Image: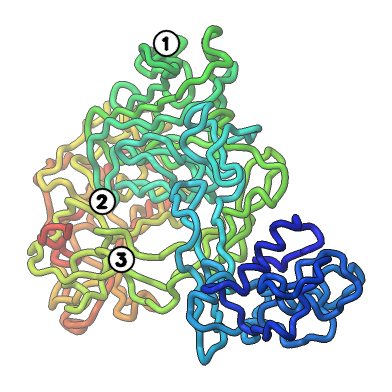
Amino acid sequence: MPAANFDRLPLALIASIAGCLVVSGCFNPDPAPADETDGTGGDDDDDDDDDSVDTTVGDDDDDDDDDATTMGDDDDDDDDDDDDDDDDDDDDDTTTDDDDDDDDVECMAPADCAPMATECQAFDCVDGMCDITDVALGEPCGDATDNVCNSPDTCDGAGACLDNFAVDGETCGMCPAGPGLCGCDAGACADCTSFAQRNSFSSDQSIAGWTLTGDWGLYLETPETQSIPSVPFGNFRFGTDGNRQAPYPGSEQEDSSATTTMTVLPSMLEFTSWHVDESTPYDVKIIEILPEGGGAPVPVADCNDLGGPLGSYEFCDLLLESRPPEAVDNISIPVPIGLVGTNAQVRFRYVNSDTCCGQEQGWYIDDLNFATLCGCSDDAGCDHLDSECGTGVCSAEGECVVDPVAAGAECGDTMSDVECNMPDACSPQGYCMPNEGDNWSTCFDCPSGAGDCNTCFEGECTDCMMSDPLNQFSTTTGWTFEALNEESHGWGTYFSAPANNIVPQDPAVPLSFSPSLGTDGNRIFPYTDATGENRHFEHSRATSPPDIVPNAITFDSWHDDEGGFQYDQKLIELSIDGGMSWIVLEDCFMGASTQPFCTDTSGDVRGGADWDAITIDTSAYAGEVGILRFTYNTTDTCCGAEQGWYIDNLNFAQRCLDPLPM
């Protein structure tokens, strides 16, 4: 309780308090004998006990009278509460805000000390004196409400109770305006007073309240495919990996959607789009408006509408080649006049009709002018994004974004350092990345050692109990592919060798061992042109994951090219020091190797079953942990008869047959 200011209390209340201090059951820590107490209060009769307490107000004549109504004040010099000039009034303050005075308060039982403690302080009566201590940081107190805007109150460790309100403006779910139109305000979910101009998907707050199915979410990069490496975006984009499935480049058939929270519809839906897929009829994209209150969805874009206005957008185009992350399409979609300015949701649909083929990487969007978050006016409104990896700041568009610290700075768990769980570090975007290997991704440091591992699962590399006797390339997980010149590489899994580039054109050759690992050499998808334009100069390589080197490397080989004496060169290498140095096993250049794949077959017509059995002696390195590397160099774009190089049934880096851990 704060120190009493008796100058402002009604006389009757003062008399009541004073009377309580001397009646039976009221505790007075320093009682005075009745005959030593001045009981005058304009009454000369000293016979009544009640007069033993001075209840006068504004009596300047008796400096010591008020000592009878104080608690725990042994200083009787001058405590007159009625004297406006008294500098010592605070000495009588028995509130718990001043811990220095706790030991000055006498008590007979713990309950006597309760009025001096807050709910974040413990109290006790020790040796006749009150003992007040602060409870631990984080202990519950006050309001137990628990929602987005108001977390349960907790003690601050210094005796005060914290209300734990969310930062004003943080996205919340339900307010009078409806979902998607709300922001926290003083611990309550209220209507947003302003909105950011754009949604750049800078954090998971950007999709709070969205309804997602399939693989829709925030991505920093695309998945790898059988023939195209992963494409890093640099910042979060929102989308789906389509018919890709982890562990990449696995595939699946996906029919999925992403539905925004309620938003006020502008006259044009604007955003950027990036995709690599077959488009209609195999990878179909649809955008619909869902009016508030229900009713039929209103399509505003539909790639099924070939040649029509709904199917005229760039994201409906066929695109099955490597695409730079900055090569985005700027999309503007008109909103029907009757819906402009109304509250509605926007739904993005992505429908894959099959699991084919080997190039698709999905569909990703960014920089929306709808479904934006509550706007900010200064950095203080973005504190909810503060972390050890960045600071929340207000952008020029009124959107809270993260100003990151240097990429790679330590954060989170810095102790773990294994292949499936490396030390956490700050990302370039300002988020603490756990650096755990993706579940079901390839690993090589399991307890049984490289070559006997299954996959990463929940930060650990698991042992493989049973492996395929041969690598038949049902997946290329763990392999890396790279172009060694400015052209794209053609490495991936193939079911047939492509049609060649001569007139008349020889058709594609279905391979009897398939899928197989290979490259189409100087051919370029879609292989339909026989005029000489559909070729390129390829210099590329494929590198295996590590495995235990056997006495001999064996595999089946199929090629149709100029052999490699000078053109269409093939090189096979082994590293036993983790890729620091390489040992040449076979090299077709200038006749250094006599292996069948070094033979010129460009004038032959090869059947799909015309495979060559290959054996390469590696007994000198048997038992070592090794990596294989296959390099293919066409050296030019000539001449048109080539159909590439393919291998299968490799006795190295075999696939684990154990089921994926769940």
Q: Specify whether residue 73 is in view.
A: yes
Amino acid at pointer 2: Gly
85 relative to 519, above or below? below
Q: Name the residue under label 2.
A: 518
Amino acid at pointer 3: Arg
Q: Mark 3 points at which residue?
A: 629
At x 45%, y 47%, the residue is: 147
Q: Position of residue 238 (x, y in %)?
A: 46, 40
Q: Are marks 3 and 1 in contact (CB under 8 Å)?
A: no
Q: How crowded is mark 1: few (under 14 residues within 10 Å), some or many (20 or more)?
A: few
**Marker disc for residue 5:** none
303 relative to 443, above or below? above
At x 7%, y 66%, the residue is: 466
How far separated are the C-alphas under marks 3 and 1?
47 Å
Per the image, label 1 sits on a secondary structure element best described as loop
Relative to the observer, which residue lies in front, 357 or 485?
357
Amino acid at pointer 1: Gly
Quadrant placement of the C terminus: bottom left
Precedes in sequence: disc 3 or disc 1: 1
Precedes in sequence: disc 3 or disc 2: 2
Q: Where is residue 247 in the image (x, y as percent from the top left)?
A: 26, 53
Precedes in sequence: disc 2 or disc 1: 1
How far separated are the C-alphas under marks 3 and 2?
12 Å
At x 17%, y 60%, the residue is: 661
Q: Mark 1 points at which residue?
A: 307
